[in-house]
Image (cartoon, grey):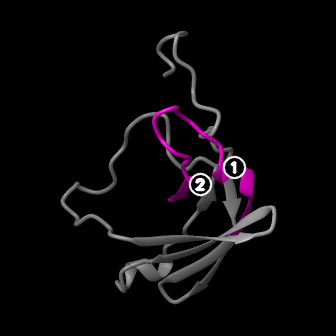
Amino acid sequence: ERSTQRRTSPPRTPELADDVFSRGSAQAGNGEAPALTIKLAAETRASGDQDEIAITLDLPGDAEVQNASVKLHVNGDAVAMQRSGTRFIGRALVPAAEHQRLHSPWRGAYGSIVTAV
């Protein structure tokens, strides 16, 4: 998207101020370590003119994971997460209209974008 002026970054996915990825590609270690698998669940509940998004993120029970930190965002906004062992729990409020906004004449509205790093 940065290589040409014809295509711009989508407004719903802004670059995050606390982006943890470098501009270049880098790989830690020798590249032979197994991939880290996480389970992320996000559930939306209507609450008047706002929707509450309840987020649960589970990490595997490895010893190294005990020292892991997680950054979670909903639509580009950071969400404070509470940790209990290898489980992280957080909540975010989003205007209900955001979940009703159409992005395409061919598809219905999408939900929020939840990312974990």
- Asked whether 47 or 10 is in front, the reply is 47
Furthest residue toward bottom = 85
Magenta region, residue range: 92-117
**Left or right of 60, for residue 85:** right
Q: Residue at (22%, 54%) from the top-left corner?
A: 31
- For residue 39, what is the image quadrant? bottom left
Furthest residue toward right = 49
Compared to 1, does 97 lie above or below? below
Q: Residue at (68%, 73%) from the top-left corner?
A: 91
Residue 96, percent across and down?
73, 57
Residue 50, percent across and down?
77, 63
Q: Which mark is residue 61?
A: none
Looking at the picture, which amino acid does disc 1 mark? Answer: Glu
Residue 21, percent across and down?
50, 45
**Helix, strand or loop for disc 1:** helix
Q: Which mark is residue 98?
A: 1
**Left or right of 28, for residue 43:** right
Check if residue 13 falls in the magenta segment: no
Mark 2 vs 1: CB contact within 8 A: yes
Mark 2 or mark 1: which comes first in sequence? 1
Looking at the picture, which amino acid does disc 2 mark? Answer: Ser
**Helix, strand or loop for disc 2:** loop
Compared to 58, does 99 lie above or below? above
Residue carrying label 2: 112
Query: Which label lies toward us, 2 or 1?
Result: 1
Check if residue 98 falls in the magenta segment: yes
- Asked whether 64 or 105 is in front, the reply is 105
